[in-house]
Image: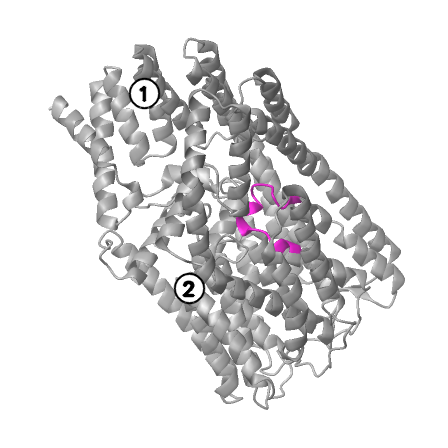
């Protein structure tokens, strides 16, 4: 940025080898495909095909090495640390086999991390020239701007339209669902229900109760954009990076500054609309680091980098210690920033309590939420899916060794940044165009976007206009921003990686491949000038091919095939479950789904709902109620840390008692409410249900205990402004009456 021309210590000159053209095409396509999917869908198995294809990337690298014998393999400590993280996840998975856990989620997440490792390896081999690095960063810029534009549209226009459309069909859908639960639907009503479900799908409306309730609150209460990622915080992390890139590009480029200023303004508006505090704080930190690079004197720039980062760590640590000391004094009338810090501290304290019980292996991949709920602080509201801290996130899912590898990589990266030349490796290469796209990376991106659009159109009949807009916008933005990425030095990319790291330290998301790959793309581009570790040989080529084929085969057998087969059978069963005339066939489909994927509890849960719905239409058929309970028990055996299966059985027995007044049902309801409370204490729904069931089962001491705890949680939620955790007025009066009866 200034005129400092110092060289970076211990860094060799770049090896300017352009990779085989199929490799950047595949990387551009896979990254784009990944970034078009909701970030949290990986644990659910919705991005397994992306991971399955990504495992083939080492084969493409091997073919390139075979074609170009002058190229050499890039491998260093960064790669080694990443594969230690991956190994930690697999060790935690094997540990779950002995201790029990949700193995389907664990397998999904382990293979996603293995795919991340293969993708990063391919990126490291490909991004070894200035032009390749420029292409990769421009892809991040272009897709990020598209995401920001979509986010602004969502904030100002789309959510209002969706709310109006949703309210117009919500009542019809609820009426049909209630009718289906009570006495079944006619064929015409089944068709109408499926049509409404398809409309909900096009609107991205969740169909299950808790997720749908959250969706309704989001529509009614805020307009936070999510892009195509479905999580505001994850979008905020990407936007924070874009702010730094655009600001650096504006400072470096003498021409097209108005275009860059417009892009910066668009991104800032979207970032403001996300209300992501961690992303906004990270953005400020990135701009300060950018200012140091721009205006500090050459002799002081390294000292200022280190001094600022150390000061930042001290201030952050002090804020955490101060917050822990006063965590109970903050309530909903406090400053929002203080409340946000309080929420994070509650998450971290609960997460540490869970991790200290199993420090070596964590909670197991994909099992954090179930375990965390047992240790959640009473004042904490959300049932979080991750600890909202990058290091704790990796520790929970990959164990202590994975976390230490992550910490080591972070320390090495910061050290590299502090010792880097201020003007390291700025490219003067003019980007050459391939027809209407500038590089194979963008050709792959366009293929992925068109493929995603056609796939959705064929499978659902829904034409996704967002993808169409991306297809048109990508080549246009590629042409506009082609010079910007070429003028971004490696120090700027390091700052961007630090910005994302700061954001993830407060927002989490390390188990979401989309956001992790953005960080790894920045690392690969910034570290692209490292000296290759070894020459290519036939044995190394053979090892790469063998490892890739082994990964592909094992993933297909253990994950992709069973998940795909179970999903198809489950979809078939669910499409028939509301009619009533195909009970035998529907039950058979459900049972086939459970056999297709023996690790997944979800088919058993839906089978339980099916059997229970049949019993509700004819309460004299007790065998259906018994079958529902057996199905929910099977689900619990496959997810033994989750409270939901005990809670569902408790609610079903309590509903049966209220309908039939059979004492046995009240006793069983009390039993399962108590079991659910053991797995998730401090929940107002479980405690209030337990109190009522214990009273009906003639267990006054348990009823008094549960009612008292329910009121305590209610008052604590009122103090902290967690309105969704408060009891209804009717339920609150019932709890008070139970306490008065005992007194």
Toward which corner of the image does residue 420 lie, by quadrant?
Answer: bottom right
**Position of 70 relative to 648 (above/below):** below
Q: Position of residue 449 (x, y in %)?
A: 67, 57
For the residue pair 669 and 701, the one nearer the viewer reads as 669
Residue 50 falls left or right of residue 725 = right
Residue at the extreme top of the image, as rendered: 620
Who's the residue at 56% across and 84% down the image?
257
**Marks 1/2: CA–CA distance:** 45 Å
Q: Residues within 10 Å of mark 1 (few under 14, many from 20)?
A: many
Residue that numbered label 1 is attached to: 670
Quadrant assignment for the C terminus: top left
Bounds of the magenta segment: 33-48
Q: Position of residue 698 (x, y in %)?
A: 23, 15
For the residue pair 43 and 81, the one nearer the viewer reads as 43
Residue that numbered label 2 is attached to: 273
In magenta segment, residue 705: no
Q: Position of residue 205 (x, y in %)?
A: 48, 44
């Amino acid at each position: 940025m200034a005129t400092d021309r110092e060289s970076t210590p211990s860094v060799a000159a770049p090896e300017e080898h352009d990779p085989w053209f199929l490799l950047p095409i595949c990387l551009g396509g896979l990254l784009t495909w990944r970034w078009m999917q909701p970030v949290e869908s990986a644990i659910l198995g919705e991005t397994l095909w992306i991971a399955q294809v990504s495992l083939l990337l080492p084969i493409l690298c091997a073919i390139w090495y075979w074609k170009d014998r002058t190229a050499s393999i890039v491998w260093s400590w960064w790669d080694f640390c990443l594969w230690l993280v991956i190994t930690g996840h697999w060790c935690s998975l094997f540990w779950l086999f002995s201790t029990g856990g949700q193995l389907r989620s664990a397998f999904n997440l382990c293979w996603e991390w293995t795919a991340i490792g293969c993708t990063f390896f391919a990126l490291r081999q490909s991004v070894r020239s200035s032009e390749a690095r420029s292409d990769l960063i421009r892809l991040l810029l272009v897709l990020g701007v598209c995401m920001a534009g979509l986010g602004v549209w969502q904030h100002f226009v789309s959510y209002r339209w969706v709310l109006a459309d949703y309210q117009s069909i919500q009542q019809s859908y609820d009426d049909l669902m209630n009718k289906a639960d009570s006495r079944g639907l006619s064929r015409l009503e089944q068709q109408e229900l499926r049509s409404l479900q398809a409309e909900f799908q096009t609107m991205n409306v969740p169909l299950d109760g808790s997720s749908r309730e959250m969706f309704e609150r989001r529509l009614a209460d805020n307009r936070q954009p999510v892009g195509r990622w479905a999580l505001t915080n994850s979008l905020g992390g990407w936007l924070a990076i874009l702010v730094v890139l655009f600001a650096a590009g504006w400072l470096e480029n003498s021409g097209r500054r108005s275009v860059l200023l417009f892009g910066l303004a668009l991104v800032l508006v979207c970032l403001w609309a996300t209300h992501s505090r961690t992303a906004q704080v990270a953005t400020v930190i990135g701009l300060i680091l950018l200012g140091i690079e721009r205006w500090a004197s050459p002799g002081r720039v390294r000292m200022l980098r280190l001094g600022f980062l150390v000061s930042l760590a001290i201030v952050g640590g002090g804020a955490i210690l101060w917050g822990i000391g006063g965590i109970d004094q903050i309530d909903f009338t406090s400053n929002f920033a203080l409340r946000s810090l309080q929420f994070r501290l509650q998450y971290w304290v609960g997460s540490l309590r869970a991790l200290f019980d199993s420090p070596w292996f964590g909670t197991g991949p994909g099992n954090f939420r179930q375990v965390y709920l047992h240790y959640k602080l009473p004042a904490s509201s959300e049932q979080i899916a991750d600890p909202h801290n990058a290091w704790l996130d990796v520790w929970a899912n990959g164990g202590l060794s994975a976390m230490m590898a992550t910490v080591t990589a972070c320390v090495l990266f910061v050290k590299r940044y502090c010792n880097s030349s201020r003007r390291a490796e700025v490219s003067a290469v003019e980007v050459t165009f391939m027809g209407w796209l500038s590089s194979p990376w963008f050709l792959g991106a366009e293929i992925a976007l068109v493929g995603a659009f056609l796939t959705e159109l064929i499978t659902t009949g829904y034409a996704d206009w967002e993808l169409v807009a991306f297809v048109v916008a990508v080549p246009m933005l590629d042409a506009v921003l082609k010079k910007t990425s070429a003028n971004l030095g490696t120090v700027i990319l390091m700052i961007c990686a630090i910005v994302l790291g700061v954001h993830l330290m407060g927002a989490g998301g390390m188990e979401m491949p989309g956001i992790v790959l953005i960080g790894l793309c920045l690392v690969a581009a910034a570290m692209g000038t490292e000296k290759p570790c070894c020459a290519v040989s036939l044995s190394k080529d053979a090892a790469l091919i063998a490892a890739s084929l082994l990964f592909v085969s094992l993933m297909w057998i253990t994950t992709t095939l069973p998940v795909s087969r179970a999903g198809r059978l489950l979809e078939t069963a669910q499409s028939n479950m509301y009619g009533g005339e195909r009970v035998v066939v529907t039950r058979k489909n459900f049972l086939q789904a459970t056999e297709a994927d023996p690790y997944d509890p979800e088919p058993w849960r839906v089978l339980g709902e099916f059997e229970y719905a049949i019993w509700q239409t004819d309460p004299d058929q007790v065998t259906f109620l018994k079958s529902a309970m057996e199905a929910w028990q099977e689900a619990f055996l496959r997810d033994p840390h989750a409270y939901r299966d005990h809670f569902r059985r408790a609610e079903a027995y309590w509903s049966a008692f209220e309908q039939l007044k059979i004492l046995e049902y009240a006793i069983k309801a009390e039993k399962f409410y108590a079991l659910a409370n053991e797995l998730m204490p401090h929940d107002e729904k479980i405690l209030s249900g337990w109190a009522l069931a214990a009273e009906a089962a003639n267990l006054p001491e348990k009823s008094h205990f549960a009612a008292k705890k329910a009121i305590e949680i209610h008052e604590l939620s009122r103090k902290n402004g967690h309105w969704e955790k408060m009891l209804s007025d009717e339920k609150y009066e019932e709890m008070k009456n139970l306490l008065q009866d005992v007194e």
